[in-house]
Amino acid sequence: MSLADPQSAGLPALAVAGLSKSFGGVQAVKDVAFQVAEGELLALIGPNGAGKSTCFNMLNGQIRPDRGSVKLNGEELVGRSPAQIWRRGVGRTFQITATFPSMTVAENVAMVLMSQKRELFSFTRSAVNRHRARALELLDMVGMAGQADRPCGVLAYGDLKRVELAVALGNEPRVLLMDEPTAGMAPRERVALMGLAARLAHEMGVAVLFTEHDMDIVFSHADRIIVLSRGELIAEGDADQIRSDPLVLKTYLGEGQVYGQDKKRKE
């Protein structure tokens, strides 16, 4: 199943050009440009403070850039609200999960389906039940249908991340922004979640842009990688190209144990 828009054939799902933002006298992001194709996983990496979160917040309308363009299948998004951008097909997952603990797994997914249909003001049991079948389909996609009737508040953290992915897919996004999707998870859970996200992105034709500190995850699942340092893109390529890029090695690897290479500790 693909969510691609036939009218946008040939265009990148997400096209960013000249994106810039300053806070006071500090240039947080400067002339960032990249594209993400349908079904592609693009990793945005960089040291802490590189500008990754600012980039993400400009892409989904939480922060307005000083200049630059963000286009979804050719349609300009700059100047639109986060809600408008979400309705046009840009989904997002967050570093900290955002589910309703007292509601069941299925009800959490039904909430986004109701929002998509502008039915949240008529939130009743019957309204939730109207969307239960679709909610179960989404939960089945992420391996959580068997826990549909459990409250989110009792779920393990890794399972909550899967529910959050189902919620994000409920709006049928053309672009999915994943902010540190494996943060706080055990190593095996990290691999499983990103493997799932990659498979669904390829199958559904969703363009995925994600940030991630675990370089094993990045190199295992990203189709391409872009590297941000002090607000500017300094490198782009596949895993082998990024591993061997001199500027990346100089600016990023100084942080410590990444890229599968342990820095020698000084005794």
Image (cartoon, rainbow, N blue to C red):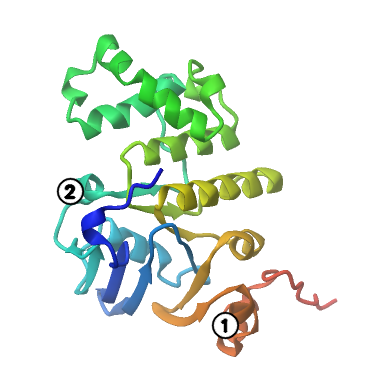
Q: Nearer the viewer, mark 1 or mark 2?
A: 2
Snapshot quadrant of residue 135: top left
Residue 61 visible in the displayed image: no
Which residue is at a point 33% across and 77% down the rendered structure image? 33
Assign the C terminus to one quadrant of the image: bottom right
How far from the left and from the top, in percent, is residue 60?
28, 56
How far from the left and from the top, in percent, is residue 39?
43, 57
Tell me the crowding category of disc 1: few under 14, some 14 to 19, or many 20 or more residues within 10 angstroms, Cα based: many
Residue lying farthest bottom?
246
**Secondary structure beneath label 2:** helix
Assign the N terminus to one quadrant of the image: top left
Amino acid type shown at disc 2: Gln
Spatial CA span between label 1 and label 2? 36 Å
Q: Between disc 1 and disc 2, whose residue precedes?
A: 2
Which residue is at a point 50% across and 23% down the rendered structure image? 153
Rendered position, 82 above or below 122 = below
Residue closest to the eye, 203 or 92: 203
Rendered position, 250 above or below 174 = below
Which residue is at a point 53% across and 66% down the rendered structure image? 223
Rendered position, 116 above or below 80 = above
Residue closest to the eye, 113 or 102: 113
Label placed on residue 64? none
Residue on which the image places disc 1: 248
Residue closest to the eye, 251 or 34: 34
Snapshot quadrant of residue 221: bottom right
Which residue is at a point 32% across and 42% down the rendered structure image? 172
Label placed on residue 84? 2
- Residue 246 in the figure: left or right of residue 86: right
Residue 35 visible in the displayed image: yes
Amino acid type shown at disc 1: Val
